[in-house]
Amino acid sequence: MRDINSAEYSRNYGFWNEDEQKAIMSARVAIAGVGGDGYQLGLKLAMMGVEIFDIADPEVFEPENSNRVPGATTLNYGRSKAEVFEESVKAINPDADIRIFKDGVNDDNIEDFTSRASIIFDESELTYLHVGTSLARAARQLGIPDVLVMNIGFSAQVTSFKPDSKMTFEKFMGIPEGATTKDIKEMTVDFSRCLTYLPHYSDLRTLSAVKEGASLPSIAQGVDVASAVGSSQAFLHFTHNLGNNRPSPVWAPNVAYMDAYTLKGGATKYPRLSHFRHLGVAAFNNITGRNAKASYTSSDRSNRDKSIS
Protein backbone atom coordinates (compact mmCIF):
# COMPACT_ATOMS: atom_id res chain seq x y z
CA MET A 1 0.00 0.00 0.00
CA ARG A 2 1.17 3.53 -0.72
CA ASP A 3 1.86 6.18 1.90
CA ILE A 4 2.95 9.81 1.89
CA ASN A 5 6.54 8.73 1.23
CA SER A 6 5.67 6.85 -1.96
CA ALA A 7 7.57 8.04 -5.02
CA GLU A 8 4.30 8.45 -6.90
CA TYR A 9 3.48 11.51 -4.77
CA SER A 10 6.95 13.01 -4.35
CA ARG A 11 6.43 15.73 -6.97
CA ASN A 12 3.14 16.84 -5.38
CA TYR A 13 5.01 18.36 -2.45
CA GLY A 14 6.14 21.29 -4.56
CA PHE A 15 2.55 22.56 -4.34
CA TRP A 16 1.04 20.95 -1.24
CA ASN A 17 2.27 19.44 1.98
CA GLU A 18 2.28 16.01 3.60
CA ASP A 19 -0.80 16.64 5.75
CA GLU A 20 -2.71 17.60 2.62
CA GLN A 21 -1.48 14.47 0.85
CA LYS A 22 -2.78 12.43 3.77
CA ALA A 23 -6.18 14.12 3.42
CA ILE A 24 -6.27 13.34 -0.28
CA MET A 25 -5.40 9.70 0.32
CA SER A 26 -8.12 9.35 2.95
CA ALA A 27 -10.85 10.83 0.72
CA ARG A 28 -13.69 8.58 -0.42
CA VAL A 29 -15.07 9.67 -3.77
CA ALA A 30 -18.37 8.72 -5.42
CA ILE A 31 -18.70 9.66 -9.10
CA ALA A 32 -22.02 9.28 -10.90
CA GLY A 33 -21.10 9.12 -14.58
CA VAL A 34 -17.71 8.39 -16.17
CA GLY A 35 -18.50 9.05 -19.81
CA GLY A 36 -16.59 12.33 -20.09
CA ASP A 37 -15.90 14.79 -17.28
CA GLY A 38 -16.26 12.09 -14.64
CA TYR A 39 -13.72 9.79 -16.32
CA GLN A 40 -11.04 12.45 -16.65
CA LEU A 41 -11.82 13.85 -13.20
CA GLY A 42 -11.51 10.43 -11.60
CA LEU A 43 -8.16 9.76 -13.26
CA LYS A 44 -6.78 13.08 -11.99
CA LEU A 45 -7.98 12.27 -8.48
CA ALA A 46 -6.33 8.85 -8.67
CA MET A 47 -3.05 10.45 -9.77
CA MET A 48 -3.33 12.92 -6.88
CA GLY A 49 -3.62 10.03 -4.44
CA VAL A 50 -7.31 9.24 -3.97
CA GLU A 51 -7.59 5.50 -3.41
CA ILE A 52 -11.28 4.84 -2.69
CA PHE A 53 -13.89 5.20 -5.44
CA ASP A 54 -17.52 4.28 -5.97
CA ILE A 55 -18.42 4.58 -9.66
CA ALA A 56 -21.87 4.40 -11.25
CA ASP A 57 -22.56 4.35 -14.97
CA PRO A 58 -25.04 2.14 -16.85
CA GLU A 59 -23.66 2.88 -20.33
CA VAL A 60 -21.03 1.37 -22.63
CA PHE A 61 -18.42 3.18 -24.66
CA GLU A 62 -19.29 3.96 -28.27
CA PRO A 63 -17.35 5.63 -31.11
CA GLU A 64 -18.98 8.97 -30.31
CA ASN A 65 -17.17 8.99 -26.95
CA SER A 66 -13.69 8.71 -28.46
CA ASN A 67 -13.31 12.44 -29.14
CA ARG A 68 -12.91 13.22 -25.44
CA VAL A 69 -12.50 10.10 -23.25
CA PRO A 70 -9.14 8.25 -23.13
CA GLY A 71 -10.91 5.00 -22.26
CA ALA A 72 -13.09 5.08 -25.38
CA THR A 73 -10.63 3.25 -27.60
CA THR A 74 -11.63 0.93 -30.43
CA LEU A 75 -10.83 -2.02 -28.16
CA ASN A 76 -13.31 -0.75 -25.58
CA TYR A 77 -16.32 -0.04 -27.81
CA GLY A 78 -19.29 -1.89 -26.32
CA ARG A 79 -17.65 -2.26 -22.92
CA SER A 80 -18.96 -0.89 -19.62
CA LYS A 81 -17.69 2.64 -18.97
CA ALA A 82 -17.45 1.86 -15.26
CA GLU A 83 -15.37 -1.26 -15.84
CA VAL A 84 -13.00 0.51 -18.21
CA PHE A 85 -12.61 3.33 -15.69
CA GLU A 86 -11.80 0.79 -12.98
CA GLU A 87 -9.07 -0.72 -15.17
CA SER A 88 -7.60 2.72 -15.85
CA VAL A 89 -7.43 3.60 -12.15
CA LYS A 90 -5.98 0.18 -11.29
CA ALA A 91 -3.27 0.82 -13.87
CA ILE A 92 -2.38 3.96 -11.90
CA ASN A 93 -2.74 2.39 -8.46
CA PRO A 94 -3.24 -1.40 -8.27
CA ASP A 95 -4.24 -1.08 -4.61
CA ALA A 96 -7.14 1.30 -5.30
CA ASP A 97 -10.43 0.24 -3.71
CA ILE A 98 -13.12 0.60 -6.38
CA ARG A 99 -16.75 -0.43 -6.37
CA ILE A 100 -18.69 -0.16 -9.61
CA PHE A 101 -22.45 0.10 -10.13
CA LYS A 102 -23.19 -0.94 -13.71
CA ASP A 103 -26.90 -0.18 -13.31
CA GLY A 104 -26.14 3.50 -12.70
CA VAL A 105 -27.72 5.36 -9.81
CA ASN A 106 -31.29 4.43 -8.97
CA ASP A 107 -33.70 4.32 -6.04
CA ASP A 108 -32.61 0.79 -5.17
CA ASN A 109 -28.86 1.44 -4.89
CA ILE A 110 -28.48 5.15 -4.05
CA GLU A 111 -27.96 4.42 -0.34
CA ASP A 112 -25.31 1.78 -1.02
CA PHE A 113 -23.63 3.88 -3.70
CA THR A 114 -23.15 6.85 -1.38
CA SER A 115 -22.71 4.93 1.88
CA ARG A 116 -18.95 5.38 2.23
CA ALA A 117 -18.47 8.64 0.32
CA SER A 118 -16.90 11.77 1.80
CA ILE A 119 -17.67 13.71 -1.40
CA ILE A 120 -20.05 13.13 -4.34
CA PHE A 121 -19.55 14.23 -7.94
CA ASP A 122 -22.70 14.48 -10.01
CA GLU A 123 -21.61 13.83 -13.60
CA SER A 124 -25.03 12.77 -14.88
CA GLU A 125 -24.89 15.71 -17.35
CA LEU A 126 -28.09 17.12 -15.80
CA THR A 127 -30.03 15.27 -18.49
CA TYR A 128 -31.25 13.06 -15.67
CA LEU A 129 -32.58 15.53 -13.12
CA HIS A 130 -33.99 12.77 -10.94
CA VAL A 131 -30.49 11.27 -10.58
CA GLY A 132 -28.98 14.64 -9.67
CA THR A 133 -31.71 15.23 -7.11
CA SER A 134 -31.24 11.80 -5.55
CA LEU A 135 -27.49 12.41 -5.26
CA ALA A 136 -28.02 15.83 -3.72
CA ARG A 137 -30.49 14.51 -1.18
CA ALA A 138 -28.14 11.66 -0.25
CA ALA A 139 -25.27 14.13 0.18
CA ARG A 140 -27.34 16.30 2.50
CA GLN A 141 -28.33 13.31 4.58
CA LEU A 142 -24.68 12.27 4.89
CA GLY A 143 -23.50 15.83 5.54
CA ILE A 144 -21.02 15.83 2.64
CA PRO A 145 -20.44 18.08 -0.41
CA ASP A 146 -22.23 17.45 -3.70
CA VAL A 147 -20.09 18.81 -6.54
CA LEU A 148 -21.42 19.70 -9.98
CA VAL A 149 -18.91 20.09 -12.82
CA MET A 150 -19.94 20.69 -16.43
CA ASN A 151 -18.08 21.27 -19.68
CA ILE A 152 -19.48 23.61 -22.30
CA GLY A 153 -17.50 24.18 -25.50
CA PHE A 154 -13.87 24.91 -24.65
CA SER A 155 -14.85 25.81 -21.09
CA ALA A 156 -16.18 24.42 -17.84
CA GLN A 157 -18.08 25.56 -14.77
CA VAL A 158 -18.25 24.24 -11.23
CA THR A 159 -20.18 24.68 -8.01
CA SER A 160 -20.75 22.65 -4.85
CA PHE A 161 -23.79 22.24 -2.64
CA LYS A 162 -23.16 22.57 1.08
CA PRO A 163 -25.22 20.04 3.05
CA ASP A 164 -26.59 22.62 5.51
CA SER A 165 -27.15 25.44 3.00
CA LYS A 166 -30.54 26.84 2.02
CA MET A 167 -29.30 26.85 -1.57
CA THR A 168 -30.06 23.23 -2.36
CA PHE A 169 -29.64 21.50 -5.70
CA GLU A 170 -33.41 21.53 -6.07
CA LYS A 171 -33.65 25.28 -5.48
CA PHE A 172 -30.72 25.90 -7.81
CA MET A 173 -32.38 23.88 -10.57
CA GLY A 174 -35.94 25.07 -9.91
CA ILE A 175 -37.19 21.71 -8.66
CA PRO A 176 -39.92 21.73 -5.99
CA GLU A 177 -38.36 20.64 -2.69
CA GLY A 178 -40.88 17.86 -2.08
CA ALA A 179 -40.98 16.52 -5.65
CA THR A 180 -40.74 12.75 -5.98
CA THR A 181 -38.35 10.94 -8.29
CA LYS A 182 -41.30 10.11 -10.54
CA ASP A 183 -42.28 13.78 -10.72
CA ILE A 184 -38.74 14.90 -11.52
CA LYS A 185 -38.34 12.35 -14.31
CA GLU A 186 -41.03 14.24 -16.19
CA MET A 187 -39.28 17.59 -15.83
CA THR A 188 -37.05 19.16 -18.48
CA VAL A 189 -33.79 20.94 -17.82
CA ASP A 190 -33.96 24.72 -17.51
CA PHE A 191 -30.73 25.79 -19.21
CA SER A 192 -30.95 29.26 -17.70
CA ARG A 193 -30.29 27.59 -14.35
CA CYS A 194 -27.57 25.11 -15.23
CA LEU A 195 -25.61 26.96 -17.94
CA THR A 196 -24.33 29.80 -15.82
CA TYR A 197 -21.58 30.44 -18.35
CA LEU A 198 -22.52 30.29 -22.03
CA PRO A 199 -19.48 31.03 -24.23
CA HIS A 200 -19.79 34.19 -26.30
CA TYR A 201 -18.48 32.26 -29.32
CA SER A 202 -21.35 29.73 -29.24
CA ASP A 203 -23.38 28.93 -32.34
CA LEU A 204 -26.78 29.13 -30.66
CA ARG A 205 -28.24 26.71 -33.18
CA THR A 206 -26.43 24.05 -31.14
CA LEU A 207 -28.27 25.06 -27.97
CA SER A 208 -31.54 24.96 -29.91
CA ALA A 209 -30.71 21.44 -31.12
CA VAL A 210 -30.10 20.26 -27.56
CA LYS A 211 -33.39 21.79 -26.42
CA GLU A 212 -35.07 19.83 -29.21
CA GLY A 213 -33.63 16.56 -27.89
CA ALA A 214 -30.17 16.21 -29.44
CA SER A 215 -27.42 14.77 -27.26
CA LEU A 216 -25.20 17.22 -25.43
CA PRO A 217 -22.13 17.88 -27.61
CA SER A 218 -18.74 18.07 -25.96
CA ILE A 219 -15.09 18.27 -26.96
CA ALA A 220 -11.84 17.18 -25.37
CA GLN A 221 -10.74 20.68 -24.44
CA GLY A 222 -13.87 21.36 -22.39
CA VAL A 223 -13.66 17.97 -20.69
CA ASP A 224 -10.01 18.58 -19.82
CA VAL A 225 -10.86 21.97 -18.31
CA ALA A 226 -13.78 20.44 -16.40
CA SER A 227 -11.62 17.71 -14.92
CA ALA A 228 -8.90 20.21 -13.97
CA VAL A 229 -11.39 22.59 -12.34
CA GLY A 230 -13.27 19.74 -10.67
CA SER A 231 -10.17 18.04 -9.26
CA SER A 232 -8.87 21.40 -8.01
CA GLN A 233 -12.16 22.00 -6.21
CA ALA A 234 -11.89 18.48 -4.80
CA PHE A 235 -8.44 19.37 -3.47
CA LEU A 236 -9.95 22.38 -1.68
CA HIS A 237 -12.74 20.25 -0.23
CA PHE A 238 -10.14 17.83 1.12
CA THR A 239 -7.71 20.41 2.50
CA HIS A 240 -9.21 23.87 3.10
CA ASN A 241 -9.72 23.26 6.83
CA LEU A 242 -6.18 22.00 7.57
CA GLY A 243 -4.81 25.42 8.51
CA ASN A 244 -2.57 25.88 5.48
CA ASN A 245 -4.14 29.09 4.15
CA ARG A 246 -6.25 27.32 1.53
CA PRO A 247 -9.44 29.07 0.34
CA SER A 248 -12.87 27.51 0.64
CA PRO A 249 -14.34 25.68 -2.36
CA VAL A 250 -16.94 27.41 -4.53
CA TRP A 251 -20.35 26.95 -2.87
CA ALA A 252 -23.73 27.48 -4.55
CA PRO A 253 -25.23 29.83 -5.49
CA ASN A 254 -21.74 30.91 -6.54
CA VAL A 255 -20.52 29.32 -9.78
CA ALA A 256 -16.98 29.57 -11.18
CA TYR A 257 -15.96 29.06 -14.78
CA MET A 258 -12.83 28.88 -16.93
CA ASP A 259 -12.54 29.07 -20.71
CA ALA A 260 -9.48 27.74 -22.54
CA TYR A 261 -10.61 29.39 -25.80
CA THR A 262 -10.92 32.97 -24.52
CA LEU A 263 -8.26 32.50 -21.83
CA LYS A 264 -10.67 34.01 -19.32
CA GLY A 265 -12.38 32.87 -16.16
CA GLY A 266 -14.54 34.23 -13.41
CA ALA A 267 -17.23 33.59 -10.84
CA THR A 268 -20.73 34.81 -10.15
CA LYS A 269 -23.22 34.58 -7.31
CA TYR A 270 -26.09 35.31 -9.69
CA PRO A 271 -26.16 32.22 -11.96
CA ARG A 272 -29.31 33.02 -13.94
CA LEU A 273 -28.38 36.64 -14.48
CA SER A 274 -24.98 35.44 -15.70
CA HIS A 275 -26.66 33.01 -18.11
CA PHE A 276 -28.84 35.66 -19.71
CA ARG A 277 -25.96 38.14 -19.91
CA HIS A 278 -23.74 35.63 -21.73
CA LEU A 279 -26.66 34.48 -23.85
CA GLY A 280 -27.31 38.05 -24.93
CA VAL A 281 -23.73 38.55 -26.05
CA ALA A 282 -23.72 35.22 -27.90
CA ALA A 283 -27.02 36.12 -29.59
CA PHE A 284 -25.63 39.49 -30.70
CA ASN A 285 -22.53 37.77 -32.09
CA ASN A 286 -24.71 35.27 -33.95
CA ILE A 287 -26.97 37.93 -35.44
CA THR A 288 -24.03 40.06 -36.58
CA GLY A 289 -22.16 37.09 -38.04
CA ARG A 290 -19.21 37.36 -35.65
CA ASN A 291 -19.30 33.75 -34.48
CA ALA A 292 -18.02 30.73 -36.37
CA LYS A 293 -20.76 28.30 -37.37
CA ALA A 294 -20.98 24.79 -35.97
CA SER A 295 -22.63 21.79 -37.65
CA TYR A 296 -25.14 20.47 -35.16
CA THR A 297 -28.53 21.36 -36.61
CA SER A 298 -31.04 18.56 -37.20
CA SER A 299 -30.25 18.61 -40.93
CA ASP A 300 -26.50 18.44 -40.23
CA ARG A 301 -26.93 15.43 -37.97
CA SER A 302 -29.39 13.78 -40.37
CA ASN A 303 -26.98 14.12 -43.29
CA ARG A 304 -24.15 12.55 -41.27
CA ASP A 305 -26.41 9.69 -40.20
CA LYS A 306 -27.32 9.05 -43.84
CA SER A 307 -23.69 9.02 -44.91
CA ILE A 308 -22.88 6.44 -42.22
CA SER A 309 -25.78 4.17 -43.19
Image (cartoon, rainbow, N blue to C red):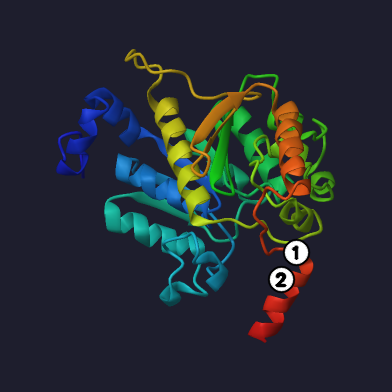
Q: Which mark is residue 221?
A: none
Disc 2 residue crowd, few under 14, some 14–19, many 20+, Cα 10 Å: some
Asked if the residue at tag 1 contacts the one at tag 2, i.e. Cβ–Cβ closer than 8 Å, the answer is yes
Quick check: 114 left or right of 234? right
Q: Which percent across, then down, holds residue 151?
A: 57, 46
Circle 1: residue type: Thr
Position of the N terminus by quadrant: top left
Front residue of 111/28: it is 28
Position of the C terminus by quadrant: bottom right
Q: Is residue 147 visible?
A: no
Q: Is residue 34 above or below residue 288?
A: below
Circle 2: residue type: Arg
Residue 237 picture quarter: top left
The residue that appears at 55% across and 61% down in the rendered structure is 102
Q: CA distance from mark 2 to mark 1?
A: 6 Å
Q: Which percent across, then down, holds residue 258?
A: 52, 36
Q: Which residue is mark 2?
A: 301
Q: Which residue is mark 1?
A: 297
Element under label 2? helix
Q: Which percent across, then down, holds residue 236?
A: 42, 26
